[in-house]
Each structure stands twice: as C-alpha cells, then as structure tokens.
Amino acid sequence: MGVARALGADIEVKRVSPRGIWRLLAPWIGVDPREGFGKAGNQFAPPWPDIALATGRLSIPALRAIRKASPETFTIIIQDPRTGADSADFIAVPAHDRLTGENVMHTLTAPHRFSPERLSELRRRVPKEIAALPEPRVTVILGGPNAIYKFTAEDSARLGASLASLATLGVSFLITVSRRTPDHAMQAVKDATAASPRIMWSGSGENPYEHWLAHGDLFIVTADSINMTGEACATGKPVYVFEPAGGSAKFDRFHESLRRYGATRCLPERFEQLESWTYVPLDAASQIAEEIRRRWNQKRTFAVEG
C-alpha cells in the first residue's frame, strides 16, 4: 500500500485466501481452477489493471495468472516471491535478500506507509497526552520470539537494565508491544521505566503506533522485526537495536547494512549519556515507486515502437 500510494495510483485491493493444497503449495502452484479466475463475477476478471502489485506468497499464483491473461499489465512483486526473478516484470526486495536479476531492485528496508509526507502530517498534530511528556521522548517498540530470535528471560533482563540506565537521564517513554512480546519482557520494561513519565500501549484500544513514530526523539527497537526497524528508520532519528539471543545470516546482513548507513546502533548495556545522530530518512516505498514509473514508461514506449 505504501508503494501504491507513492505511485499516486487509483488503488483497488484484492485479498486472496486459497485453501487446501492451493494454500499449502503457494507460491509454486497455480490458481485453484475452481475459483473461476478470469471469469465474470470473479474478483480477478477483465478489465485488467495497468499495474498489478502483489506481496506475500499466497498472492503470487494470482499475479502470475494476471500476467499470463494480460501481458500489457505491468506486474510487480514486493518481497522475494521464492519462484525466481521471472515471476513478474519488476521485483523489489530488501538488500539482505539474495534474489538478483535485471528486473530486481534492492532497498535497505522494506517499503511501508510512513512516507515523509505522512510523518510530517502527523507531527503537525501532537496528541495532548504525548505533548504532556517531557522531551526527549524515547519510543520503545517491542517484538518477541520468532523462528530467528529466542527472546529469553535473560534477554528481557538485559533490555530492562539498559532502559533503567536510560531512565536516569531524564527521558520520557512511549512504549508499544506486539502480540509476540513475552510477559517477562513486558514486566522488565515496566519495571525499568516505572519512575519515568511514560505511556505504555499493551494491545487494548486504538493503536497509537503511528504517533509513537512521528513524535519519538529516539527509538529502541527489538531486532526480530525487519518491518519495525525499517519504519523507525523512516524518521531520520537515532535508532538503537536490541538483539535478543539467536539471529541468522539474513538478519545480520540487514542490521549491518543499517549500521553502515548510519541509521542504527546496537543498544548499549548501559547508557552513560544521551547520544544523537542524523541520517537521510529511509523511504523504500518512494524509491520503489520511482523505479516502477521509469520501467513502466519504458515498457509502454517499447510497446508503441515495437
């Protein structure tokens, strides 16, 4: 959606939910023939769009079917489709993925909906509860265990100790958790920030995440989520990354690329002072949209000249 909005396109969202073997074997299998793809009444039927953009393995069979039914449609995949570079006219993947090809573009982060314009709009309207917090405001974005990171009780204790040292430097906190955040991590963060001005969102009520991004002065993000880290780097503000036990070569490449860029640093075991640094905010959606325009215009020109 971030890429589509950056294109300025008229957007129509199609959600796919294959069942049985068609779900199990996606993206390598075709579309379930019982769905009636391309026939009147199906969500995928003429008139075909100028541009079709897909993300997620379940969407790839439908995109390939659109490409076959409508060669004029410019097809795009966001993230590695696992089916090779010839699965679409254009594929955009983060730099830590290994997919290569003439039609493949690499960006440091994954695209998202937090464009510079969106963040600027949010910053013009500071919610009163955030405005009441003293600056600098530290946004803490918590993930949790996954197939890559364990997030043990010892990890939570390390995170809590670092935040407790930061709390002594006169900051306030904006804290958000995910569905994966373990109880011991939540408790460690609560205890570490108990004496500081803070707002903590634990999953109930309206999600304030976009305001946390727009109004944070410094960010602490757990390493388990590539999306959350990339979104924090859209702000141009300092981002510290906390790495729980575990990791993988892919995640290591991602985090190393952001450190080399100058957006992130490893979360210290203890803060002795507040640090500050700047960098050009990372906006993969706009970068991808610009390349799509160039390639789509090139394709249309070739179609006319050919």
Image (cartoon, rainbow, N blue to C red):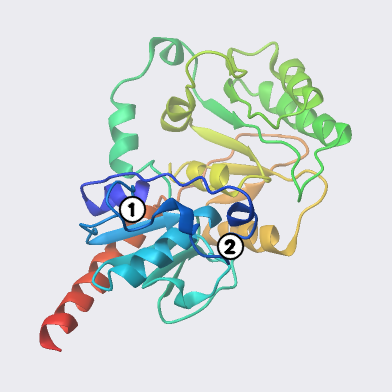
- Amino acid type of disc 2? Ser
Along the viewing direction, whichever of 5 and 243 lies nearer the viewer:
5
User: Residue at image x 37%, y 53%?
Assistant: 285
Asked if 65 appears above or below 151 in the picture, the reply is: below
Kind of element beneath mark 2: helix
Name the quadrant containing residue 270.
top right
Query: Which residue in the protein does label 1 denote?
Result: 44
Res 257 label: 2
Along the viewing direction, whichever of 85 and 224 lies nearer the viewer:
85
User: Residue at image x 69%, y 11%?
Assistant: 195
On the picture, is 31 further left or further right than 242? left
Kind of element beneath mark 1: loop
Q: Nearer the viewer, mark 1 or mark 2?
A: 1
Along the viewing direction, whichever of 144 and 51 lies nearer the viewer:
51
On the picture, is 249 further left or further right than 61? right
Does the image show residue 282?
no
Does the image show residue 304?
yes
The x and y percentages for residue 33 are 47, 59
On the picture, is 139 further left or further right than 272? left
- Amino acid type of disc 1? Phe
